[in-house]
Image: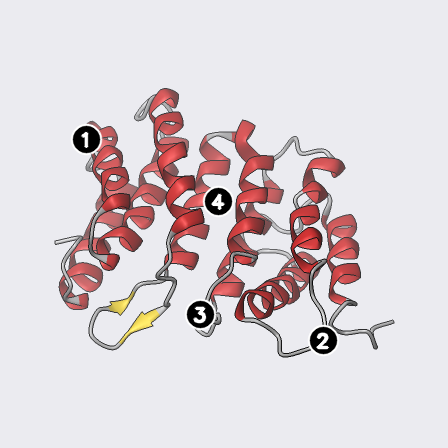
């Protein structure tokens, strides 16, 4: 059901039920199997199967953090590489399809990235860089279904995980700055539009904070570096 092309079956029924049952602990005995199954779907031939896999993985990882011992750390590490490979290479990044419904590879992957940061805190800096590489990835699709906000929220959640140094909290922005170095005269390509939109959203998230977690400890320095990058397209900023 979680791979169904029918959005009512996949999203309204299967995923909604799975998320609730996982969160309530009813599936604790099979959490690792659920994670393995989700990871295997990253290579599924159908887009809706691939893009709903990170949602299930997010639920499994969140439950693992809430109920220590339900999923061994080794399982999370085993899932990490397939997830990051898929997130960086998924070419179909449409948020919505009139037939398939919500696809949201970028948004769903961002949710999973934030969950990995909680489950595997040693991967936080890598996950920030992963988000940077996703937003700057060459693409034909412009973020029009709030993908920028979902990425910004994920980055905010990763920054909230305790223990990050200021250097780690800002280091990932070098990926963004380097990607923009080649910019010049002419229309803004979709990937650059996506990057600017995500950085704008991130600045707002860092300023206002998240309803769950508040403002990250390094929010001010990250926001300052984000604003510095945004002066490239918005040269009129103070």
* Pointer 1 local density, CA inside 10 Å: few below 14, some 14–19, many at least 20: few
**SS of the residue under disc 1:** helix
Mark 2 vs 1: CB contact within 8 A:
no
Closer to us: 95 or 26: 95
The first of marks 3 and 4 along the sequence is 4
Residue located beneath label 1 in the image:
30
Estimate the spatial distance between the alpha carbons at disc 3 and disc 4, rounded to whole Å. 23 Å
Q: Which dot, 1 or 4, sits closer to the camera?
A: 4
Callout 4: SS:
helix
Q: From mark 2 to mark 3, how far is it between C-alphas? A: 21 Å
How far apart marks 2 and 1 lie (CA) works out to: 54 Å
User: Is there any visible trace of residue 18 in the rendered image?
Assistant: yes
The residue located at (71%, 44%) in the rendering is 170
Q: Quadrant of residue 10?
A: bottom left
Residue 29, position as x, y percentages in the image? 19, 28
According to the picture, the residue beneath numbered tag 2 turns out to be: 185
Percent across and percent down for residue 126 are 56, 36
Residue drawn at point x = 50 percent, y = 37 percent: 117
The residue where tag 3 is placed is: 141
- Local crowd at mark 2 within 10 Å, few (<14), some, or many (≥20)? few
Of mark 2 and mark 3, the one earlier in the sequence is 3
Please name the residue that numbered disc 4 is placed on: 114
Which residue is at a point 87% across and 71% down the rendered structure image?
Answer: 238
For discs 2 and 3, the disc positioned in front in the rendered view: 2
State which tag comes first along the sequence, 2 or 1. 1
């Amino acid at each position: 059901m979680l791979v169904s092309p029918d959005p009512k079956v996949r999203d309204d029924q299967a995923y909604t039920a799975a998320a609730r049952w996982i969160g309530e602990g009813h599936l604790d005995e099979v959490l690792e199997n659920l994670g393995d199954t989700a990871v295997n779907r990253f290579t599924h031939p159908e887009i809706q199967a691939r893009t709903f896999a990170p949602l299930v993985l997010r639920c499994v990882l969140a439950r693992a953090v809430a109920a220590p011992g339900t999923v061994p750390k080794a399982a999370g590490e085993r899932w990490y590489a397939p997830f990051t490979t898929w997130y960086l290479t998924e070419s179909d990044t449409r948020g919505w399809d009139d037939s398939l419904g919500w696809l949201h590879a970028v948004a769903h992957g961002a949710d999973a990235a934030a969950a990995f940061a909680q489950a595997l805190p040693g991967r936080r800096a890598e996950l920030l860089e992963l988000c940077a590489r996703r937003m700057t990835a060459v693409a034909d699709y412009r973020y029009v279904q709030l993908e920028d906000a979902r990425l910004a929220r994920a980055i905010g959640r990763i920054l909230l995980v305790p223990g990050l140094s200021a250097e780690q909290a800002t280091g990932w922005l070098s990926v963004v700055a380097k990607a923009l170095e080649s910019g010049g005269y002419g229309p803004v390509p979709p990937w650059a539009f996506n990057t600017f939109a995500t950085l704008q959203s991130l600045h707002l998230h860092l300023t206002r904070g998240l309803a769950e977690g508040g403002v990250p400890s390094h929010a001010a320095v990250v926001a300052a570096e984000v604003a510095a990058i945004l002066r490239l397209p918005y040269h009129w900023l103070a």
